[in-house]
Amino acid sequence: MKLNAHNFKENAKKALKDDDLQASLQKLGTGFPLKRLAAMDRLPEFEDLRDQARDIKDHTLRHLDFYLEQFESRVVETGGKVHWARDIKDGRKIVYEICEAVGAKTVTKGKSMIGEEMAINEYLEEKGLIPIETDLGEYIIQLRNEPPSHIIAPAIHLRKSHVEEAFRKTHTELPKDRNLDAPEDLLVEARTMLRKKFIAADVGITGANFMVAETGSTVIVTNEGNGDLTQTLPRVHIVLCSIEKVVPTLEDCTTLLRVLARSATGQEQSVYTTFSTGPRGETDPDGPDEFHVVILDNGRSRMLGHDTHDMLRCIRCSACINHCPVYQSVGGHAYGSIYPGPMGSVLTPALHGLEKSCDLPNASTMCGKCEEVCPVRIPIPKMLRSWRKKQWEDGPVPTLQRLAMNWWAWWALRPKLYHKVAGWKMRIMGFMGRKSGHIKALPIKNGWTENRDFPAPEGKTFQQRWSEKGGRRT
Amino acid sequence: MSSRDYILGRIRWSLGRGAMEREDDLSLVERLSQPKANLIPKRGSGTPKQQISLFVKMAKEVNATVSRLKSLDGVPRAVAKYLKDNDLGTAIRIAPHPDLENLDWSKLQTSFGPSAGDDLNGLVMAFAGVAETGSLALTSGAQSPTTLNFLPDNHIVVLKADDLVGDYEAVYARLRRESNSADFMPRALNWVAGPSRTADIEQTLLLGAHGPRKLHILLVEDDGPEG
């Protein structure tokens, strides 16, 4: 997809006024987070597993070259092929050449964020191939020509009526008067239409949640079974993954799997977790003849050892997204990047440059929920702050904002004066809101009061009340 | 420079070192050749009886159904009953596994082999089951086509109680032990927990997405012949 990450403010304003989107997002806030909590409660070892998951990823990243080489040699030994891609241009070319070599016409696709990063569908279409997304959510947004708005629930921004509209527009061979009122009807129609595509496809492309160095296996987790049909039926299976997805052993992978689904959807385990190792053997009755793994770098190797190093631990569970008050308010498209939410606000500037995504590190309230729920304990707020700092030092800050911050810093560096003036300000604001307890409009801060009232202070600053109580808590 | 060398070079440069030092390398090689289990949740440990009841409970939670049989001989009858109860006809595509091929299938229309996509019902043999989450381990191979796990609408799986273990780690240990080579992984190892599902339309959970609509497990506790 095309990066549009410098328009966050504009996009967010539109998103707040989009009633359909707001209705969809309302469900998100109570859906995944509550299910995650329930799953955690059932597993007393969950916190310890998070520590181990973090340590496994840390260990692997410290020896990333070793584990990638091991993975490669195991894939080759089991009859597969590994392709290295520096950037998305490299990656697309590799995928196309594999398709071209087998004379492919149609390509089925399982859900893959690396595929989104490469914009592989657009590229294959340009080259005359027909790529078909098979994950229901991805299929719906492909028909609507939209990017995903969430990394595991790509069509979460849509209502049932949007899906019906897309299906009626696309499946024109079906009777016009068919009933599509219930979600079940829509599912049955998608299942029937896609079943034919699965069987006819020449190449199947999937992503990978993990690559196992010990065995040369790639791993996907799905609930629909589309990933498995995508990789089992065609002659060729192409796996798209990135360098940081490698883990040492099956045991390590299992530890990460134990925290992945629980953090994501609150499931104990996804319905299908599939380890794929090489192409079909002589005695195998089914499976692909060719097994290709495309390993993408696209800026990740630069992140190692630097400020955003820890972000490479990310296992793409989406817990940070599901719990983010900003995401819950504006949805995924507002971010204008492939990866939305807190993890995306750290990753996007690292992959595409801060100048192209300068709004993203600021699209956070710094509430810290993202770090709290991260299964591999990534310090997301700390990294957002480091982007903000870099932004401040390197330039892309609007002049007015820079002036305002300098002005504030001038006061903050003079605490006595600051407390005195703050005391006056509290008295004035307390007076303004003395009747209702709220202030409807504030000069300069109208961006805040445009959408909600400002709670009025009670007339004193925190510091004043603190010293009145002699520094005691109660 | 090849992309491979470029990427590996970048990684080493970013980590601030050259190619791995030998001593370190050896400890990493050992980590791979003698894999150790990490923390295993306690819930799967227990007596075989406890594991069976946990497995059944967890499998049912993810919308699988479970029948318990006393012997393999009872499988054809249990399959026939399941198909009849659910109005699924009498035809079934079966994995060419010796344990299944040698049963008396005279009451059903059976055929053996992979699925091409037009089978309503499929029957396979599980490699193992895991009590921790009620998951099945299905391994691809001559006796167990992967297509049977995903194409038929109704997925019936036979699991011997002897193959039921507490956790995933026990399954990996068994795969390594039985193969005794570095190539111990089957082409596909499918962990299956319940029938396929989606919540992509308004976050409403619907069963039967692209894979099976139903998952029925026949758990065979081999206490001798059925009486």
Image (spheres, coloured by chain):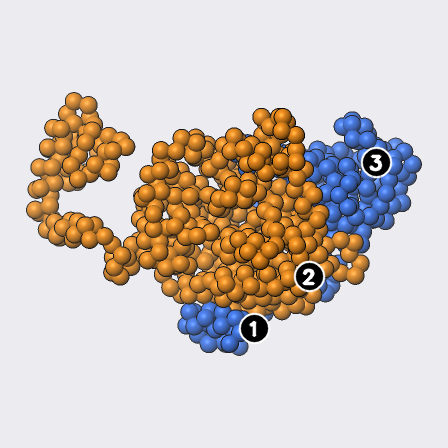
Chain colours: A orange, B blue
Residue under the image location 35 percent in, 41 percent down: A12
Q: Is residue B211 above or below residue B180?
A: above
Q: Nearer the viewer, residue A95 or B190?
A: A95
Can you see residue A46?
no
Q: Tag 1, which chain?
A: B
Q: Are marks 3 and 1 on the same chain?
A: yes
Residue under the image location 89 percent in, 45 percent down: B102
- Secondary structure beneath disc 2? loop
Q: Tag 2, which chain?
A: A
Can you see residue A169?
yes
Q: CA distance from mark 3 to mark 1?
A: 56 Å
Q: Position of residue B82 (x, y in %)?
A: 79, 31
Q: Is residue A341 above or below residue B67?
A: below
Q: Give the quadrant of residue B164.
A: top right
Q: Is residue B87 above or below residue A208?
A: above
- Secondary structure beneath disc 1? helix
Question: Mark 2 sits on what residue?
Answer: A102
Question: Mark 3 sits on what residue?
Answer: B91
Q: Amino acid at mark 2?
A: Val
Residue neighbourhood size for the residue with mark 3, other residues' Cα within 10 Å, grouped as few (<14), some (14–19), many (≥20): some
Q: Are marks 3 and 2 on the same chain?
A: no
Of badges 3 and 1, nearer the viewer stands: 3
Q: Nearer the viewer, residue A470 or A32?
A: A32
Image quadrant occupied by the C terminus of chain A: top left
Q: Amino acid at mark 1?
A: Leu
Question: Mark 1 sits on what residue?
Answer: B26
Of badges 2 and 1, nearer the viewer stands: 2
Residue neighbourhood size for the residue with mark 2, other residues' Cα within 10 Å, grouped as few (<14), some (14–19), many (≥20): few
Q: CA distance from mark 3 to mark 2?
A: 36 Å
Q: Which mark is residue B6?
A: none
